[in-house]
Image (cartoon, rainbow, N blue to C red):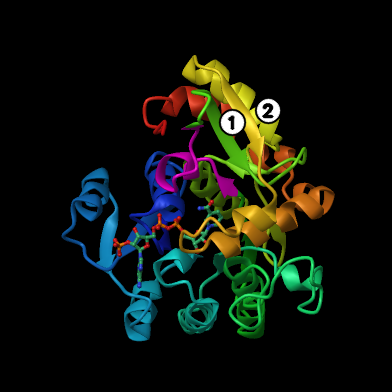
Amino acid sequence: MDKKIIAVLGATGAQGGGLVRAILADPSGGFSVRALTRDPNTAKAMELAALGAEVVAANVDDAESIANAFKGAYGAFCVTFFWDHFSAEKEAAEVEMMAKAARAAGLKHAIWSTLEDTRLKVPLEDNRMPTLHGKYKVPHFDGKGASNHFFTDAGVPTTFLLTSFYWDNLIHFGMGPKKGEDGKLGFVLPMADKKLPGIAAEDIGRCAYGVFKAGDTYIGKTVGIAGEHPTGAQMAKALTDGLGQEVVYNYVPPEVYRTFGFPGADDLGNMFQYKRDFESEFCAARDLIVSRSLNPKLQTFATWVAANKDRIPIG
Ligand SMILES: NC(=O)c1ccc[n+]([C@@H]2O[C@H](COP(=O)([O-])OP(=O)(O)OC[C@H]3O[C@@H](n4cnc5c(N)ncnc54)[C@H](OP(=O)(O)O)[C@@H]3O)[C@@H](O)[C@H]2O)c1
């Protein structure tokens, strides 16, 4: 039987990488994977080839390369790379291009890794948080959410995948526990006592694989995924247990977080404020039972900490 090819954008990265590995780990699942990368000769790309992926050169800055990479495929996993350029407009242009390529290739199923357009709940004139880049509240969310229509307009059978905060940000994004002046390890989040839906980045791709395996079930639907909805205090407790050292949760209000000065601190401050202020809707949009049904290996935060405790930098 011919396997259905899934073309995966960001295949050497967090979300796409998890999907590539999930497909390859299930050789009798009926799917094969086409891993898209800007450079098939990097160590990461060659690693995927060695695992059995078809590795194809493609760049979202070159529409023709994406159109070619989608040809002959059954489905595609579409993701954009906000933190490489900080431009919601660039993301929107890329999503439009991906949707057109998906349509031209006659794909039977696209998954678009999106997020909420926060302006639907916090219009630009709402001054609880500053407007950023002239027309956004949370640029890396808003540009994605506002681009969903490109897939619908193009008539592509699409699942809109709402992802969650990667726990891997504690490793790669400098969000791990830091030693305070009192010598205690502190874990900073601008969430007050609200829940922060989170996920092991690897589980995003595994959930996406579950969506493809479910056939038509999720086409035309929005599916939110998370591994758990812990509060900052619960995360600090799991870190304490997993790292074997006390970690204290430090609530920093979003208005302070926005001033931290690293690139994107204002965007992330607004993002956490949105998650804090709309806790119930944000959590409800990321159902844990659905997530686990898509991915039976779904990790909780404590499981993720136990598996990654040696990789979490402690500042
Ligand atoms: N961090 C979080 O908590 C979080 C949560 C939810 C959503 N997100 C969203 O996740 C998205 C990023 O996904 P990710 O974390 O999976 O990315 P990632 O780990 O940074 O990987 C992105 C991969 O995409 C490829 N890539 C970069 N530029 C490309 C281009 N111009 N054309 C084709 N491929 C390109 C790169 O591979 P090559 O070098 O091999 O080409 C890279 O390995 C962002 O938009 C972010 O907003 C993040």
The residue depicted at 72 percent of the width and 63 percent of the height is 221
Left or right position of 29 against 287: left
Per the rendered image, the range of residues in magenta is 165-178
Between 24 and 132, the one nearer to me in the picture: 132
Quadrant position of residue 133: bottom right
The residue depicted at 35 percent of the width and 73 percent of the height is 69
Cα distance in 3D space between marks 1 and 2? 9 Å
Q: Earlier in the sequence, mark 1 or mark 2?
A: 2
The image shows residue 175 at horizontal and vertical percentages of 50, 43
Left or right position of 252 against 178: right
Quadrant position of residue 312: top left
Left or right position of 226 against 73: right
The image shows residue 89 at horizontal and vertical percentages of 53, 82
The residue depicted at 44 percent of the width and 66 percent of the height is 81
Q: Secondary structure at mark 1?
A: helix
Give the image quadrant in which the ligand numbered 1 is located.
Answer: bottom left
The image shows residue 37 at horizontal and vertical percentages of 30, 64
- The residue beneath circle 1 is 301
